[in-house]
Image (cartoon, grey):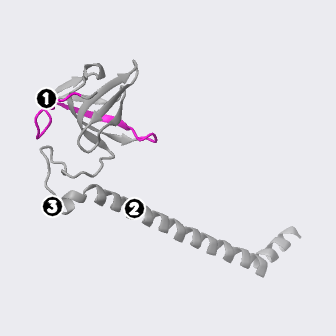
């Protein structure tokens, strides 16, 4: 008797309506997910294009091959160390350049620091050193440094002789 009722339910218009509703819901969800994926890829293309804005329009590059524009560098900075603070586990650098008067850079044990072929420790960094910082911005607006390259003199310019107050 139960199997007969179950068989009748699967043949009923009620079951057919539920089945069609679920299929329509699945199609709508698939279209929504496709739109989200397409929008994500469009946004990533726009972001990459914006990062290469100078190269896209033939802007001259500096000595490092970086665009010499005044656009912000959200993934890093090029400049001189203005001040250093920190603890045994992390170091905070304030890097100054023409484009960024003061940018906070967080250095931890995972940060790779190099000067030519030599690997340096955060304790070997000093105020006035010319550096290139590569990393990712965090929620506080500071750069979490992943790689720091130390130069003897600023690339493409003479060393600054002025001191900040």
Check the image and report above or below for 88 versus 144: above
- Separation of residues labelled 1 and 3 (CA atoms): 29 Å
Residue wearing tag 1: 152
**Which circle's residue, 2 or 1, is located before the other in the chain?**
2
Quarter of the image for residue 141 reads top left
Name the element at disc 3.
loop
Q: Is residue 9 above or below residue 150?
A: below
Quadrant in which residue 138 is drawn: top left
102 or 30: nearer the viewer: 102
Labels 2 and 1 touching (C-beta < 8 A): no
Outermost front residue: 165
> In the structure shown, which secondary structural element does the residue marked by tag 1 occupy?
loop
Residue 131 counted in the magenta span = no
Residue 95 vs 86, above or below: the answer is below
Which residue appears at 39% of the width and 24% of the height?
Answer: 90
For disc 2, the marked residue is 43
Q: Is residue 140 left or right of residue 28?
A: left
Q: CA distance from mark 3 to mark 2?
A: 23 Å
For the magenta stretch, what is the residue range? Answer: 138-163
Answer with mark 3 or mark 2, whichever residue precedes in sequence: 2
Q: Is residue 143 visible?
A: yes
Q: Mark 2, mark 1: which one is toward the viewer?
A: 1
Depth check: 33 or 7 in front?
33
Determine which of the numbered discs, if any, sits on residue 58 in the image.
3
Query: Would residue 12 be seen by someone viewing this image from the given angle?
Result: no
Q: Position of residue 131 (x, y in %)?
A: 22, 33
Please rate how many residues cluster around mark 3, counting C-alpha atoms within 10 Å: few if below 14, some from 14 to 19, many from 20: few
């Amino acid at each position: 008797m139960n199997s007969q009722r179950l068989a009748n339910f699967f043949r009923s218009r009620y079951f057919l309506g539920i089945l069609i509703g679920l299929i329509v819901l699945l199609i709508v969800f698939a279209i929504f997910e496709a739109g989200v994926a397409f929008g994500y890829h469009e946004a990533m293309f726009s972001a990459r294009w914006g990062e290469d804005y100078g190269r896209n329009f033939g802007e001259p590059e500096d000595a490092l091959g970086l665009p010499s524009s005044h656009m912000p560098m959200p993934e890093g900075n090029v400049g001189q160390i203005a001040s250093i603070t920190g603890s045994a586990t992390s170091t905070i650098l304030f890097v100054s350049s023409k484009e960024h008067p003061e940018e906070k850079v967080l250095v931890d044990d995972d940060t790779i620091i190099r000067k030519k072929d030599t690997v340096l420790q955060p304790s070997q960094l000093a105020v006035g050193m010319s550096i290139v910082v590569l990393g990712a911005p965090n929620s506080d607006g500071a750069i979490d440094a992943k790689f720091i390259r130390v130069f003897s003199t600023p690339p493409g310019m003479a060393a600054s002789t002025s001191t900040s107050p």
